[in-house]
Amino acid sequence: MGGRIARVEQRRSDLRFPFPEHFAERLENKTVSSLGRRAKYLLARLSSGEALVMHLGMSGRFTITLPHQGKPRQIGEYTYDTGADPAHDHVVFTMEDGTTITYNDPRRFGCMLLIPEEDLDNHPLFAGLGVEPLGNELTADYLAAKARGRKADIKAFLMDQRIVAGLGNIYVCEALYRAGISPKRSANCLANASGKPMPRAERLVSAIRSVLQDAIDAGGSTLRDYRQADGTIGAFQHTFSVYGREGEPCLTPGCRGIVQRIVQGGRSTFYCSKCQR
DNA sequence: ACTGTACCCTGTAGGC
DNA sequence: TGCCTACAGGGTACAG
């Protein structure tokens, strides 16, 4: 925090979107005043008044290499293996103290944008976002109000960033399992006829919170690409109850169900049809 | 206003 | 071995 960006090496013209005009120039010699996050976007506020907005997409990764660790992945000089192919190192930030922050993204579904800080809240990327899942705004009342009258699957409802910002496929599957809710139910099962929350809405809020907190405590879920900034992998994938467990027994004590895989909205859903109702 | 589909791109795993 | 398909932590632009 408070570090100055000395140099930015941008190795291609676009990721998901084109890089901003004069991207490197607008970052170099600026100080990072704070780091933050909104939904799945990372934010670095700069002394210029602009914010560097970054999204990792499906396969994006930042690796931080401290000066004493040497240049990352230098050929013939082993430092440590981050599991990333240097061919997909698209941006390298070098800080004043020599720390490098390398953005690697094989699929290039990530993006980087520069947005004036005062415009962030009204920017199209942020204006419509739903509540933070670990914040106080995620309540059974909130979910019930949003879900009322919605016929779409509750799975799709929870994946919608305009409802809850930051839930992805894994954590939605795991949260629905913990809450004992079938992913095929309509979203409006969270509310009664007058829009008040059903008991399952309370269970869902608790499940979302506990899944995310457990995943954070375990260092995240590394299926293939995800790493922490020092290259270490997460451990939460070992704790999945349903995700990726098609055909395996349900882990709920006493439940003799088998985990099913179905496709909803073009994405895999894993669930137990016996204890998720 | 909602809902479903196609698509962006690359890598990997599994079937033949 | 190689070739083919399906699939992957996400999000958007459409058509209906």
Image (cartoon, coloured by chain):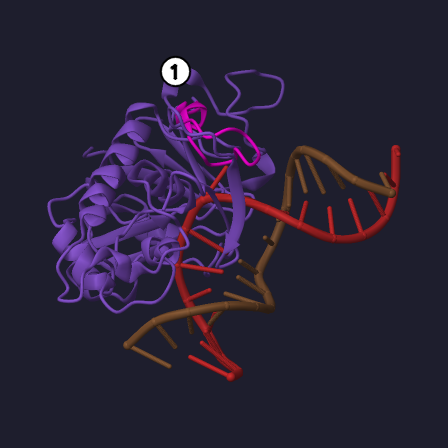
Chain colours: A purple, B brown, C red
The image shows a total of numbered marks equal to 1
- Residue A266 or A206: which is nearer the viewer? A206
- Residue A56 or A210: which is nearer the viewer? A210
Q: Can see residue A46?
A: no
Residue A205, percent from left and from top: 21, 44
Bounds of the magenta segment: A233-251
In the rendered image, residue A242 lying in the magenta stretch gets the answer yes
The answer to whether B9 appears left or right of A94 in the picture is right
Give the quadrant of residue A99.
top left
Residue A168, percent from left and from top: 38, 46
Residue C5, percent from left and from top: 74, 53
The answer to whether A49 appears left or right of A247 in the picture is left
- Residue A235 or A277: which is nearer the viewer? A277
Q: Main secondary structure of the magenta part?
A: loop
Which residue is rendered at x = 12% and y = 55% of the image? A141
In the rendered image, residue A5 lying in the magenta stretch gets the answer no
Give the quadrant of residue B5.
bottom right
Chain to which the residue tagged by mark 1 belongs: A
A208 shown above or below A50:
above
Which residue is rendered at x = 48% and y = 24% of the image? A71
Q: Can see residue A221?
A: yes
